[in-house]
Amino acid sequence: MRSFFLLALCSAATLLSSCQQPTADTQATAATEAAATSAQTEAEARAAVTRFVAAQPNPALYQLDSASVVDVDTQWQVLVPRTDWAGRMPNKAAFEVSKQTGQVRSLMVK
């Protein structure tokens, strides 16, 4: 039984380490929530992500001018290339913007 538990724990750790963790900072999230307005258009979603990234510890890593936006029902999904991820896959950070509230949250990318 103990071996099974250790095996499950190791498997979970391996799975988690293979995923890229979101780079959201709790202060950046709080700042984005405070400034959130609706994001009904693609331009408003880009602006919300730009404000969110500006509050990150290293905003220069993000190439906001190369961001792509996808309309997904009640959210916008914004993919932003990162300079430090060049040459690897995935090479983009993902963000989700609520159309109703304008809240931005980073997504895990695998």
Image (spheres, helix red, strand yellow):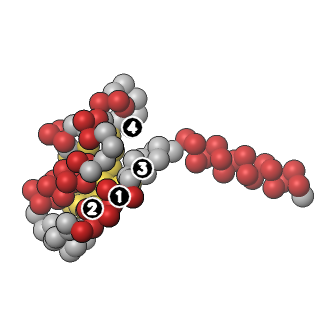
> Which numbered disc flags the more N-terminal residue, 1 or 3?
3
> Which numbered disc flags the more N-terminal residue, 2 or 4?
2
Q: Is residue 94 visible?
A: yes
Q: What distance separates the C-alpha of mark 2 from that of mark 4? A: 27 Å
> Answer yes or no: do the residues labelled 2 and 4 have beta carbons within 8 Å?
no
Residue wearing tag 4: 90
Instruction: Check disc 4: other Cα within 10 Å, few if <14, some if 14-19, many if 20+.
Output: some
Q: Residue 31 carries which label?
A: 2
Q: In which quarter of the image is residue 84?
A: top left
Q: Can residue 98 be seen in this view?
A: no
Residue wearing tag 1: 27
Residue wearing tag 3: 22
Q: What distance separates the C-alpha of mark 1 from that of mark 3? A: 14 Å
Instruction: Check disc 1: other Cα within 10 Å, few if <14, some if 14-19, many if 20+.
Output: few
* Residue occupying image coordinates x 38% and y 52%: 24
- Amino acid of disc 2: Ala
- Amino acid of disc 1: Gln
Q: Is residue 37 left or right of residue 77?
A: left
Is the N terminus in the top left, top right, bottom left or bottom right quadrant?
Answer: bottom right
Query: In front: mark 3 or mark 4?
Result: 3
> Which numbered disc flags the more N-terminal residue, 1 or 4?
1
Q: Which mark is residue 102?
A: none
